[in-house]
Image (cartoon, grey):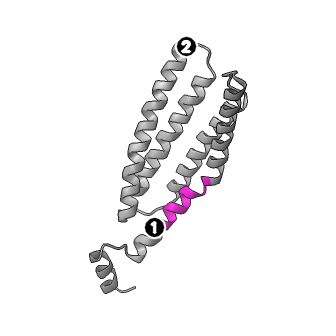
Amino acid sequence: MTTWFDKRALSAGGLTPDQQRKVRAIENAVAASDRAVKDHLISLDTFERSAIKAKTGRVTAEWPRRIAGLHNEALRARDRLDRLDTGLRAQSRLRASLTELASAFDAWHSGLSSTDTDVVEHAMARMQRHYTNAGRLGKSGLADLKAGR
């Protein structure tokens, strides 16, 4: 494209072709994890509904495995973002968000594997803190991504 087109697209609020390419690369890197994450979340929801229906309240052995899968998938998405070289601020913010999300899953996993109440409460507080940070970074990363920054 020409410089004229790039300037006109920017003044109209759109993205240049180069920015569009970079944004698509970031979206594809993160979206590659969608199916695996959805599978883990559906399984966790199914286990929770089964426990409520049976009135056991127990955590099955499958829960820690699924949460570890979510942790690994967040790290895989982060690694795919690391391999890109877009130079966009959105990439670094989304990368930080995925790191925080992986830390939240790690805290959740450690809380499930303990029987000590203090350890569980500490793990849940850590999980909430990391999850909040991941949400904040993710929202600002998405706003940057939409703006092509």
Residue nearest the observer in this picture, 92 or 146: 146
Disc sitting over residue 147 in the figure:
none
Q: Is mark 2 on a helix, strand or loop?
A: helix
- Magenta stretch in the rendered image: 22-34
Identity of the residue drawn at 56% across and 29% down: 108
Residue 23: x %, y % from top left: 45, 65
- What is the three-letter code of the residue carrying label 2? Thr
Image-based side of 110 in relation to 46, left or right? left
Q: Judge whether residue 89 can be spotted in this image.
A: no
Identity of the residue drawn at 26% across and 76% down: 11
Residue nearest the observer in this picture, 3 or 148: 148
- What is the three-letter code of the residue carrying label 1? Lys
Image-based side of 88 in relation to 124, left or right? left
Q: Judge whether residue 7 can be spotted in this image.
A: yes
Which quarter of the picture shows residue 52? Answer: top right
Please give the residue where the numbered disc 1 appears in the rendered image.
22
Q: What element carries label 1?
A: helix
Q: Does the magenta stretch include residue 72?
A: no
Residue 109: x %, y % from top left: 60, 29
Q: How crowded is mark 1: few (under 14 residues within 10 Å), some or many (20 or more)?
A: many
- Quadrant location, the N terminus: bottom left
Q: Main secondary structure of the magenta part?
A: helix
Q: How many labels does the image show?
A: 2
> Which label's residue is closer to the chain start, 2 or 1?
1
Please give the residue where the numbered disc 2 appears in the rendered image.
117
Residue found at the very far left of the displayed protein: 11
